[in-house]
Image (spheres, rainbow, N blue to C red):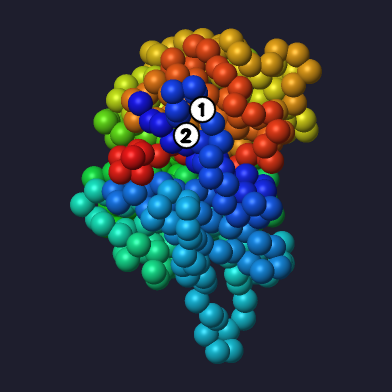
């Protein structure tokens, strides 16, 4: 059972430790700064934190002592335009940004790839490091793909890569709004993986267009990487063939809308979502914070509410705000109103850790050496 959790927030990075008396907030790093993502690297115990500092740009930090001290690392950056080249423009005439605005996702490479890291950004760039974040290279295979010019922003003004799934055979990314993509040659070439998804927010003739799908979160089962789940803007989808085809899951309740998703690391049929009321409001349905869990591959869902507020609640959970540990028993989720809950029984019951954190952007359990 994991004994450490990192919580990235609008005003700092918080470390929680599981002691005999329960979960307590320990080390706090970057107090006052926007921490967009955190990655505890299971392979060597390193900890990475992505910062979004507005006028000062994005920053990347690395710690080898669980957040006690930090070193600055070079952040992913777009290469300069060739001399005389004109900036790219979107279909509506806006210039595509020439700088990284948010480091939105960080993932470690395979266990046999020490030092390999992947980073997804806004606006829509995928970067790779092979030296533990000492240097980064823009993935040209995806960046230069013709369909990228048709991607568009969801909640942000620009498209962004928020989900990266690495397995023994390749890497997958999910883009809001740009669909799901897979590469089996370390990013040299890419193919879309959205067959079965649909976009109800588009005109009928573009409903099935792969490059405009808006997956909110893509996750895979660690033990069975063929099994994938996506919380989409207009529903829940499941794949059992690494995204070649998707099946809509229609039994989720109390709503099919949400951002966060997690799948059991050993059982591909067990998954959790945090439903919400969509579009204009984006708050819990009926003012009740709940987690929905399936244990049969989406055939049915149980609404989990024990320990969660069931009246006058306005908590929204962002796409990285839910995580499950390596045992599949311990879960945590945080919200835009600064609440943080942890369950140690698969979601059957929840304990509130704090109602007064800054808005939560990401929660991640430390596994392996980082959990020492």
* Circle 1/circle 2 CB separation < 8 Å: yes
The residue to which callout 1 is attached is 23
Question: Which label number is shown at residue 17?
Answer: 2
Instruction: Find residue 319 and report its horizontal and vertical position in percent.
Output: 56, 38
Quadrant into which the N terminus falls:
top left
On the question of residue 228 being in view, the answer is no
Total numbered labels placed on residues in the image: 2
Determine the residue positioned at 58% across, 89% down.
84
Instruction: Find residue 343 and report its horizontal and vertical position in percent.
Output: 50, 20
Determine the residue positioned at 57% across, 19% down.
351
Q: Nearer the viewer, residue 47 or 250?
A: 47
Question: Which label number is shown at residue 60?
Answer: none
On the question of residue 116 being in view, the answer is yes
Give residue 58's quadrant in the image. Answer: bottom right
Quadrant into which the C terminus falls:
top left
Considering the numbered disc 2 on the image, is that residue within a helix, a strand or a loop? strand
Q: Nearer the viewer, residue 235 or 49?
A: 49
Q: CA distance from mark 1 to mark 2?
A: 6 Å
């Amino acid at each position: 059972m994991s004994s450490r959790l990192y919580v990235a927030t609008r005003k700092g990075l918080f470390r929680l430790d599981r002691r005999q008396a329960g979960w307590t907030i320990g080390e706090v790093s970057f107090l006052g700064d926007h921490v967009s993502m955190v990655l505890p690297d299971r392979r060597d115990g390193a900890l990475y934190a992505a910062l979004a500092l507005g006028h000062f740009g994005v920053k990347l930090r690395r710690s080898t002592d669980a957040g006690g001290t930090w070193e600055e690392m070079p952040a992913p950056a777009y290469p300069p335009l060739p001399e005389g080249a004109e900036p790219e423009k979107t279909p509506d005439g806006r210039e595509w940004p020439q700088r990284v605005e948010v480091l939105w996702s960080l993932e470690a490479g395979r266990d046999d790839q020490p030092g390999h890291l992947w980073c997804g950004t806004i606006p829509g760039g995928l970067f790779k490091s092979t030296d533990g974040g000492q240097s980064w290279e823009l993935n040209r295979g995806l960046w230069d793909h013709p369909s990228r010019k048709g991607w568009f922003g969801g909640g942000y003004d620009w498209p962004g890569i928020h989900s990266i799934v690495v397995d023994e055979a390749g890497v997958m990314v999910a883009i809001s709004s740009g669909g799901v993509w897979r590469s089996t040659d370390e990013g040299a070439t890419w193919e879309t993986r959205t067959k079965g998804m649909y976009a109800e927010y588009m005109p009928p003739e573009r409903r099935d267009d792969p490059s405009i799908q808006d997956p909110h979160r893509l996750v895979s089962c660690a033990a069975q990487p063929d099994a994938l789940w996506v919380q989409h803007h207009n529903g829940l989808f499941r794949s059992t063939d690494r995204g070649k085809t998707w099946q809509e899951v229609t039994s989720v309740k109390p709503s099919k809308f949400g951002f966060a998703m997690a799948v059991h690391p050993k059982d591909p049929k067990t998954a959790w979502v945090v439903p919400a009321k969509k579009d204009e409001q984006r708050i819990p349905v009926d003012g009740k914070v709940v987690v929905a869990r399936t244990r049969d591959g989406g055939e049915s869902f149980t609404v989990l509410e024990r320990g969660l507020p069931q009246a006058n609640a306005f908590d929204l959970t962002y796409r990285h705000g839910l995580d499950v540990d390596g045992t599949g028993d311990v879960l945590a989720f945080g919200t835009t109103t600064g609440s943080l809950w942890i369950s140690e029984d698969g979601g059957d019951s929840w304990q509130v850790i704090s109602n007064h954190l800054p808005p939560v952007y990401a929660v991640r359990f430390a596994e392996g050496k980082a959990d020492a």
